[in-house]
Image (spheres, grey):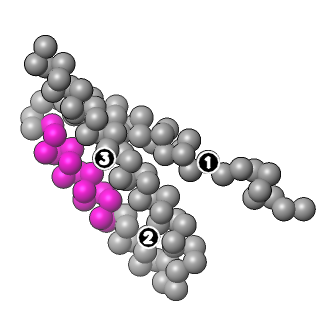
Amino acid sequence: MNEIIIMTAALVAGVLLGMFFFGGLWWTVRKGVTAKNPALWFLGSSLLRTAVVLAGFYFIMRGDWKKSLFCLLGFIVARFIIMRLTRTNPEKTHAP
């Protein structure tokens, strides 16, 4: 029972890390295309997002491959969630 709770917590943490990573990517692209210096936005965002996610994975896994697997699964699930939430309407993007 205790292991189920720990694996569920690792899964939820992976979803949160994924939401941070992919949500931050979406936000960076939206800001970066209109920024004065987009290279700085993209580089800084990439370094920050990667550092936070790697530290999060390291903190969550603590040497247990099962926790890292559940965390990775949550991270991948978050990618699909962000893709669904940030989907654009093709009819609005292609003006005649």
Q: Mark 1 and mark 3: span between their CA atoms?
A: 20 Å
Q: Identify residue type, mark 2.
A: Phe
Looking at the rendering, which quadrant does residue 50 occupy?
bottom left
- Residue 57, horizontal then vertical, whole percent: 21, 44
Q: Residues within 10 Å of mark 2 (few under 14, many from 20)?
A: some
Q: Are marks 3 and 2 in contact (CB under 8 Å)?
A: no
Residue 17 seen in render: yes
Q: Identify residue type, mark 3.
A: Leu
Residue that label 2 marks: 42
Q: Residue 87, which numbered label?
A: 1
In this picture, which residue range is highlighted in magenta?
A: 47-61
Q: 85 above or below 36?
A: above
Which SS does the magenta portion mostly show?
A: helix
Question: Does residue 56 appear to the left or right of 77 in the view shown?
Answer: left
Q: Earlier in the sequence, mark 3 or mark 2?
A: 3
Question: Does residue 67 appear to the left or right of 25 in the view shown?
Answer: left
Residue shown at 77% from the left, 56% from the top: 92
Q: Dot 3: what SS?
A: helix
Nearer to us: label 3 or label 2 = 3
Residue shown at 13% from the left, 13% from the top: 1
- Residue 84, horizontal then vertical, whole percent: 56, 41
Q: Identify residue type, mark 1.
A: Arg
Q: Mark 3 and mark 2: span between their CA atoms?
A: 19 Å
Residue 69 seen in render: no
- Residue 74, horizontal then vertical, whole percent: 34, 34
Quarter of the image where the C terminus is located: bottom right
Q: Dot 2: what SS?
A: helix
Residue that label 3 marks: 17
Q: Earlier in the sequence, mark 2 or mark 1?
A: 2
Q: Residue furthest right?
A: 96
